[in-house]
């Protein structure tokens, strides 16, 4: 994992990377964590970033461990945590090494976004090693299908409302090809940074390769304003989303 790269994101993390705890439209993540916290005592946030999830985890669990490799992000998380329940650990998740603890619940929220498949595989291995027997992992990743859904919607806006709203066919094709660096690998440019986006079946297959079985998969949905500037008021339903998976050993 490139520590300097993640440190460079620290100052603009909230602007460049969507913070799910703040933008989750239906509260799907909070709902799942609340349910898990009724039975489990310990949770780890792998790739905690600036700590946006930590207040929520501290409400639902008695022991919270926040793990990241970028010192600037980890320092932000320390300032944001504000609870004696939380312990902080610096660790390169991509190396696939065992952490100095195991927990009942592991969270990995938009941490599986490195364009390097070896690093993503290392993170998944570390995640599996951090889970206690019969433990549960809550994983959220950007959805590749949602990218195409957004562009299809922009086409629909133009067809329904006419110029200047939305995009025409040629404009949409051009912008999509500029944004998606690799269709087969699911690499999308986000704020100029190559970022891994996942298909549903691809995610399930990758988890299976680590011996993790999917218990539940659902969407974490966001407002249209996260993807489209000044979306029309009539644009309702089927908003953009990330994939959330609950899996177990």
Image (cartoon, rainbow, N blue to C red):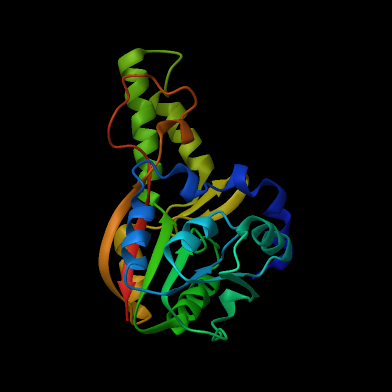
Residue shown at 55% from the left, 67% from the top: 116
Question: For the view shown, which residue lies furthest in the left direction?
Answer: 215
Instruction: Give the image location of residue 186, x and y in percent.
Output: 44, 56
Looking at the image, which is closer to me, 186 or 106?
106
Seen in the picture, residue 176 relative to 213 is either above or below; the reply is above
Left or right, 143 with respect to 81, comes to left
Seen in the picture, residue 241 relative to 231 is either above or below; the reply is below
In terms of image quadrants, where is residue 231?
top left
Left or right, 236 with respect to 55, comes to left
Seen in the picture, residue 55 relative to 67 is either above or below; the reply is above
In terms of image quadrants, where is residue 100?
bottom right
Looking at the image, which is closer to me, 127 or 34?
34
Instruction: Give the image location of residue 54, x and y in percent.
Output: 54, 60
In terms of image quadrants, where is residue 103?
bottom left
Instruction: Give the image location of residue 31, x and y in percent.
Output: 33, 54
Residue shown at 61% from the left, 42% from the top: 15
Quadrant where the C terminus lies? bottom left
Seen in the picture, residue 18 relative to 98 is either above or below; the reply is above
Q: How many marks?
A: 0
Left or right, 29 with respect to 238, comes to right
Looking at the image, which is closer to me, 64 or 46?
64
């Amino acid at each position: 994992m490139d520590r300097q790269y993640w440190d460079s994101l620290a100052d603009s993390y909230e602007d460049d990377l969507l913070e799910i705890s703040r933008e989750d439209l239906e509260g799907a993540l909070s709902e799942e964590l609340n349910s898990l916290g009724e039975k489990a005592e310990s949770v780890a946030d792998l790739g905690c970033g600036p700590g946006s999830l930590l207040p929520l985890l501290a409400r639902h669990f008695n022991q919270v461990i926040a793990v990241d490799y970028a010192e600037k992000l980890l320092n932000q998380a320390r300032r944001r945590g504000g609870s004696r329940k939380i312990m902080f650990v610096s660790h390169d998740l991509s190396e696939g090494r065992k952490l100095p603890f195991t927990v009942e619940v592991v969270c990995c929220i938009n941490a599986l976004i490195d364009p390097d498949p070896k690093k993503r595989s290392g993170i998944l291995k570390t995640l599996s090693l951090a889970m206690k027997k019969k433990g549960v992992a809550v994983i959220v990743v950007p959805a590749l299908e949602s990218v195409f859904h957004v562009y299809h919607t922009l086409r629909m806006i133009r067809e329904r409302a006419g110029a200047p709203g939305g995009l025409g066919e040629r404009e949409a094709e051009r912008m999509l090809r500029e944004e998606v660096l690799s269709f087969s690998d699911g690499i999308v440019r986000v704020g100029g940074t190559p970022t891994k986006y996942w298909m549903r079946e691809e995610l399930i297959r990758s988890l299976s390769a680590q011996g993790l079985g999917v218990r539940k998969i659902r969407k974490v949905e966001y407002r249209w304003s996260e993807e489209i500037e000044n979306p029309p008021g009539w644009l309702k339903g089927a908003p953009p989303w990330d994939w959330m998976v609950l899996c177990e050993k």
